[in-house]
Amino acid sequence: MRAAASLILAFERGLRSEIPSLTKAKIPSCLDAFGTLQPHLAALVGNGGFRALLLRALELASEEVPWMGTVQVKMDGHLEGLEELHVQLSAEEFSKGEVVLLAQMLGLLVAFIGEKLTLRLAGEVWPVIALNDLDLEESGGRQSDCPSPSIREGDKHERTKGGTPPVEGN
C-alpha cells in the first residue's frame, strides 16, 4: 500500500513542479492527492462517505504517526492543519505521514471494495501511474519499500488535459 501511496504522492509533487504558479506553493502533496481523489470517490459514496473514509484513514495513520492526530477533517472533506505541520516538521517526517495517510485510505478502499475496484478507481484518478503491478492486498498499509514513480511514457500530462484513460480488459 505504501508503494502505491508513494507513487501517487511523487506524481503529485512532479505535476506541481511543472506548473510555475504552484512550484513555490507550500501545499502538501497529500492535499493534492486527496483533492484529486475526492470527486471520484464522492461520486461513488457521496461526500459524507468520503469524509468518513478520510476520518478513519486519519485515525489509523495517527496510530503510527502521532502528529497526524492534530489534523482535522472539515465537513467538506478537506484536511485542515497540514499546511502548518508541513512548515513545522522535517521534510522526511512529514513525507512519512503523507505516505501513511494515503496508504491507509487505499487500504480502506481495498477492504471495502476489493483490490480490483480500487485499482480501477486509482486508474481513473491517476491514469498515468502504473499501479496495476502492485499487490495492494499483500501487506496492508504497512509496506516499507517505496519504488520510484512509474509514469507511463507520453501520458505525463494526461490528467491536466482532461484526457480519459483507455479502458483495459479485466
Image: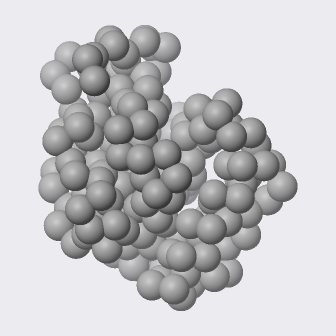
Q: Is residue 35 above or below residue 62?
A: above
**Quadrant of the rendered structure where residue 95 is?**
bottom left
Q: Position of residue 106 (x, y in %)?
A: 44, 54
Color theme of the render: one colour
- Residue sitting at 27 percent across and 17 percent down? 168
**Along the viewing direction, whichever of 89 and 133 lies nearer the viewer:** 133
Q: Is residue 45 above or below residue 5?
A: above
Is residue 118 at all visible to an observer of this figure?
yes
Q: Position of residue 87 (x, y in %)?
A: 54, 72
- Residue sitting at 83 percent across and 55 percent down? 75
Q: From the viewer's perspective, tell me whether residue 168 is left or right of residue 38.
A: left
Is residue 19 at all visible to an observer of this figure?
no
**Along the viewing direction, whichever of 84 and 67 lies nearer the viewer:** 67
**Along the viewing direction, whichever of 93 and 102 lies nearer the viewer:** 102
Q: From the viewer's perspective, tell me whether residue 146 is left or right of residue 90.
A: left
Q: Position of residue 142 (x, y in %)?
A: 31, 73
Q: Quadrant of the C terminus?
A: top left
